[in-house]
Amino acid sequence: MKHKKTILILSLFIITMVYLVYPYMEVKNTNSFKEDIIRFHIKANSDMEEDQLLKIKIRDEVLDAMGKEFGNSTSIEETRAIVENNLDYIKNIAEDVVAREGKDYSVNISMGNKKFPTRQYGNITFPSGEYETVMLTIGEGKGKNWWCVMFPPLCFIDIGHSNAGAVDESLRDVLTEEEINFLLSNKGSNIVLKSKIAEVAEKTKVYFAQRFAKN
């Protein structure tokens, strides 16, 4: 009887530790990839058709002008340096497009950490959270934004996000297999945590049920 009580106490302790410790470990593992990514966003002045078209024209010219340099980058440090050295240049490109289209919108560009909701990128799901981001804002910046991943240089693989094979291959250059599988799973960390805890709890329950049956 005393032996059974000891086993029961140990099983409760194990389950408690799973609930307390595993969520922290899982979130840390599945979010570590964010440190290896730089996003690029262009926010339109408004959702009016002409402002959205202007955003696309700016996107095309920026990617055309910077594509070779960013596309050849092999590290996040290199991409970060390219951005810092070309912030004014990228801003000037956008200002030239704005002026050519007969608008008087201001253009602002910044680089830093920003929070985003969960977003789909082709067949990849980027979970919500903070990402290092280059933000190009046109005018009031109240319209829908276009975005891509500047590093790894997915922006310069396929603008339409349709070349999934090339995107996956580029990610494999900087992310682990576990991180890539997480991005491709289309599941948030809360779903992973719930299923893992349930799995461990169920295995623990079955194990000790079998032990008690034998005794």
Image (cartoon, rainbow, N blue to C red):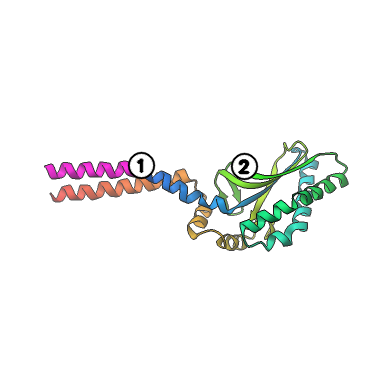
Which residue is rendered at x = 57% and y = 43% of the image? 130
Who is closer to the viewer here, 196 or 116?
A: 116
Who is closer to the viewer here, 84 or 150?
A: 84
Query: In terms of image quadrants, where is residue 159?
Result: bottom right
Name the residue type under label 2.
Lys
Q: Is residue 93 above or below residue 51?
A: below
Q: Considering only order in the chain, which callout, 2 or 1, is on the residue closer to the N terminus?
A: 1
Disc 1 + disc 2, Cβ < 8 Å: no
Who is closer to the viewer here, 46 or 25?
A: 25
- Pointer 2: what residue? 114
- Asked whether, in this view, residue 128 is left or right of residue 42, the answer is left
| Disc number for residue 115 | none
How packed mark 2 is, by other alpha carbons closer than 10 Å (few <14, some 14-19, many 20 or more), is few
Name the residue type under label 1.
Tyr
Main SS type for the magenta part?
A: helix
Query: In the rendered image, which quarter contains the N terminus?
Result: top left
Which residue is rendered at x = 82% and y = 39% of the image? 105
- Pointer 1: what residue? 19
Marks 1 and 2 sit apart, C-alpha to C-alpha, by 30 Å
Membership of 114 in magenta stretch: no
Range of magenta residues? 1-18
Which residue is rendered at x = 46% and y = 51% of the image? 29
